[in-house]
Image: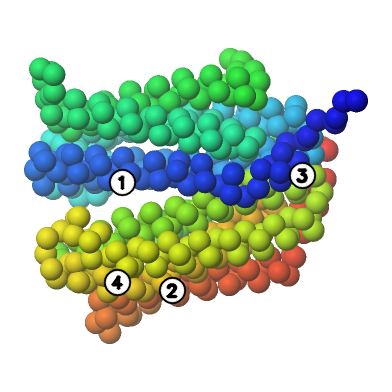
Amino acid sequence: MSSTPLSATDKLQKLGLFAITWPIFIEQLSHILPGMIDIFMISHLGDAAAAGVSVANQIVVFFIVLFSFIGLGCSVVITHYLGAQDKQGAERVASNAIGINVWFGALISLLTLLFSDQMLALLHLPKELLPYARPFLALMGGTLFLEAINIVFASILRAHGHTREVMLIALGMNLINIALNSILIFGLFGLTPLGVVGAAVSTVISRFLACLAYVYLVKRQIQLSLKLHALWDFSNAIIAKILHIGLPSAGENLCWWTSFMVITYFIAQMGADQMATFTYAMQLSMVMMMLSISIGIGTEIIIGHLIGAGELDLAYRQLLRSLRVGVTLTVIMTVAVVLAAKPLFALFSHKSEIIEAGASLLLVSLILEPGRTFNLVVINSLRATGDARFPLYAGIVSMWGVAVVLAWLFGLHWGWGLVGVWSAFALDEWVRGLLMYRRWKSRAWEKYAHATRAGLQRV
């Protein structure tokens, strides 16, 4: 007697949140650690080299954020089709998303290659840093199309539940990048030292190898046919679905990025030590943030499948379970980081003033990080239902009306310094988190979920 094969949605529910999320957490960590290691290695060439590469990398990261909105949108839409057991619909979405990011990535790569000097000039980069920043940006920016392709392939695999495979590719890519960095930057094994150019070449090679691995896995794991005509055979209806989710998500990310840059400007006025303390505290905060992001993405994948299957009550309860798990794990991790704060800051700096200030700053994270978990997990879940605009509108109001305004008021005007800025971050996260939670509990998102399911039948 043969058993009925499990659908993709049933498989995800059987796996559970933890099995889906832990590979995402490792993958997300693997995205931030190489940047830290790159700066650490390049700093051995001098402070000017590290500063030049850091500024050039801001431009690269900005474009990567832009590429991600197609990945975010296609991932959610694919989960809807898979939840509805429409594999052909999911394949059409994947093909369209790949085509969009190939052209978008090629355009951005060309513009960055041609106008890298002008982009650096917009950031008022000192002339003495240009010899380091210019070649790095030209190489990294000129090959950004590889990152655009990798982002969309990773999103497609995640939507199908293949989070471990994405994790392994990310880990492999970064191990190759670190190894090549050591060889090319410093000229090991008799090679000519390439300095910052070596760092860029290492990243380009590792991105290319990752792209090959993604192509292989997409063909093997989900049997997606990668045909050349996908580069121009687009469906307006499918693109509209992707952009309906992706554009508000990109807007929210860009809103956070720009508000963060304004707050960084405030901190720069507090002095060099405060800027250094903030920089190191953000590195540790990013590690804690990756946990919230990973639980949010894992929950989004499960809820997207449930929405496609019409299981709205199960989706509602899944978010509440994810929040309980997410907040508990976040509190445990934050307490561990706070207890180890001084030794951790000592890895970055030997100045006792910075170590003490950083340890005091992280105490506020005991309030900040649980609020961030509320925010990120519910935002991803709302996006999975099709309710993508509410997080954007709430984010614009809170990021600028709470985070930016209070960072200036607490940090500069009232003289609380970094503790004031960190407190403003905490209030922003809790305001947005509670707004998102209220939205979920009201079940206002159900009308978007019904519209999403109805729209699946029309493509």
Q: Secondary structure at mark 4?
A: helix
The answer to which of 111 and 69 lies nearer the viewer is 69
* Residue under the point 51% across and 34% down: 166
Q: Which residue is mark 2?
A: 367
Lower position in the chain sequence, tag 3 or tag 1: 1
Is residue 264 shown left or right of residue 356?
right
Q: Are marks 2 and 3 in contact (CB under 8 Å)?
A: no
Q: Are marks 3 and 4 in contact (CB under 8 Å)?
A: no
Image coordinates for residue 284, horizontal then vertical, percent:
32, 58
Which mark is drawn over residue 361? Answer: 4
Image coordinates for residue 235, horizontal then vertical, percent:
69, 30
- Looking at the rendered structure, the kind of residue marked 2 is Ile
- Looking at the rendered structure, the kind of residue marked 4 is Leu
Which mark is drawn over residue 308? Answer: 3
Q: Mark 1 or mark 4, which is nearer to you?
A: 4
* Residue under the point 72% across and 39% down: 11
Q: Which residue is mark 1?
A: 58
